[in-house]
Image: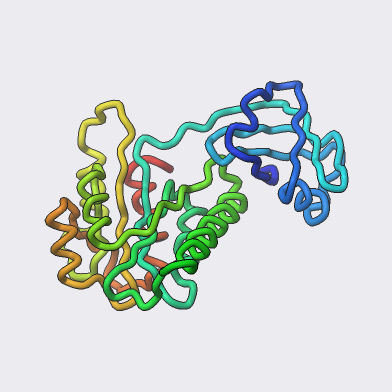
Amino acid sequence: MSNPVFFTPAGSLGQVVPGSTFVLEGAEARHAVTVKRLTTGEPVDIADGAGVRLTGTVVDAGSSTLTVKASEVLFEEQPEVRLVLVQALAKGDRDELAIETATELGIDAVIPWQSERAIVRWKGERAAKAHAKWQSVVTAAAKQARRAWIPEVRSIVDTVALAKAVADADMAIILHEDAKNPLRTVLEELAALPNEGKPREVLLIVGPEGGISPREVTRLSDSGAVTALLGHHVLRSSTAGPAAVVLASDVLGRW
């Protein structure tokens, strides 16, 4: 069974080496001590959310601190092909369910999208709170999945800003029920391209419950996006993204 994972701020593990100790503080330490009830001698991982993972043993559990003796400190490289889920805002917390599941499955970043047909709207103070909630959701999911990387939740975009992101990406795929080419075929074409030795980024674009409007499909396609059929059935907005992550991770050799 894998060790439980607790997060510490990025960069805080930089000076830790095997044999040294690290003191975890704050909410994560209190969770480890009071909820998980970790005690002396138990194995644990501490990750900084940016790829560094400390594996060690608890040597002291205070009321609000956890002291761990490091046995190994490793940096986990990001995959050569990074997957970014562009998730349209959806009602009923289905968008949050989508990014939670996609994080557990290995998504590298998330972009909230204010699409034309989205019922939910992020405006003013709500936008900042909603963005923070999304970041909290992916952090908790990364912890559950024992990940060393916490996916980045990027700033919300409208369709104009998304079109620019599409133009800048190595590939952008619109998951669309009217597409002709299966997603597997589109991904296999990407996998067959020569690797120039630099990370590549693929956007997986998921619309709201009402679907992506024809105008949006045209706008994004003109910027370089391609449409792809995920399957024979219409999936909810909470399901399409995670399903695409699974297939992409397999075809692109991430798994």
User: Which quarter of the figure is the C terminus placed in?
Assistant: top left
Q: Is residue 166 left or right of residue 94?
A: left
Q: On the rendered image, what quadrant is the N terminus found in?
A: top right
Residue 164 at what x, y percent from top left?
23, 51
In the rendered image, residue 211, in percent from the top left (x then y), is placed at 27, 74
**Please, is residue 167 above or below residue 111 in the view?**
above
For this view, does 74 lie left or right of residue 177?
right
Q: Residue furthest front?
A: 124
Determine the residue positioned at 77% across, 49% down: 32
The mark total stands at: 0
| Closer-to-camera residue (6/229) | 6
Which residue: 49% across, 65% down? 130
The residue sitting at 55% across, 29% down in the picture is 75
Q: How is the image coloured?
A: rainbow
At 20% from the left and 47% from the top, the residue drawn is: 167
Q: Quadrant of residue 240?
A: bottom left
Q: How far from the left and from the top, in percent, is residue 36? A: 78, 53
Measuring from the top left, give residue 214's x and y in whole percent: 16, 71
